Image (cartoon, rainbow, N blue to C red):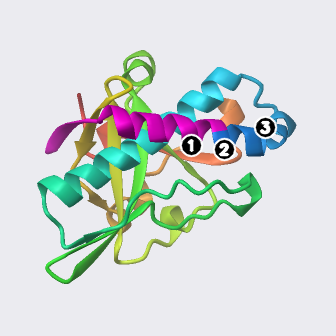
Amino acid sequence: MKWIEVTIKPETQKKCIDFVEAVYRTNKNRYKGRGQLDIAKIKKDIYRGKIAEYAVYEHYKHKLKFEHVTEPDISVYSTSKKSYEADIVAVHNSVEYKMHIKSQHIYQAENFELSWSFQKNDPLVFNPLPTDYIVACLLLSDKRVIIYHPIKARHVVKKYKKPKLARLQHTKVVLYGRDIGIEF
């Protein structure tokens, strides 16, 4: 599968770090209530997701020159107000792409398997719209991101599998790189 590497600018990294701190402050009690006690991991996961969004934004807006690309949302919501809307909406040649960006760090890919997690109840998993696309990203570092070519969400509905970790199987499903033509 085709991919491109993007390096994130320091000012974007700073914006993401500020976002992480604000999200954690707003939702820390909710994380504790769900048994998520590893603060460093929570913050890393939030950061990596937002950095991947900015990498995709930069690539489609400035490199591919799409006519319209929404910037990643850095508003802070409580976890109960989280939505399943696309992370970025892009328009090119009058075609709309609702991009759902998923990230994984290379350490996780090397030690476990190249994969991306989704909430089981996300409509993207069981009833995607024709304009829904999944953009899988692999973070090589805190500022270097590989962006894989977008995948039409409807083409992978039957490829979701259970996560390997039993504790996640109740709420998550996973797309494994090997099942969607992505290897590293």
Q: CA distance from mark 1 to mark 3?
A: 14 Å
Per the model, the C-alpha gap separating discs 2 and 1 is: 6 Å
Residue mark closest to the camera, 1 vs 3 = 1
Between discs 3 and 2, the one toward the N terminus: 2
User: In the rendered view, does 29 fall on the left or right side of 171?
Assistant: right
Residue at the front extreme? 11
Image-based side of 143 in relation to 65, left or right: right
Q: Which residue is mark 3?
A: 28
Is 123 located above or below residue 28 in the figure?
below
Of residue 88 and residue 101, the one placed in the foreground of this image is 88
When asked about the image quadrant of residue 147, the answer is top left
Residue 127: percent from left, percent from top: 50, 72
Which residue ends up furthest to the bottom in the rendered image?
94
- Indicate which disc, 1 or 3, sits on the residue closer to the N terminus: 1
Q: Secondary structure at mark 3?
A: helix
Horizontal placement of 138 versus 85: left or right? left
- Which residue corresponds to mark 2? 23
Query: For the residue carrying disc 3, how many other residues have a C-alpha within 10 Å: few (<14), some (14-19), or many (20+)?
Result: some
The range drawn in magenta is 1-21
**Residue pictured at 74% horizontal, 54% vertical:** 78
**Can the viewer see residue 169 in this picture?**
no
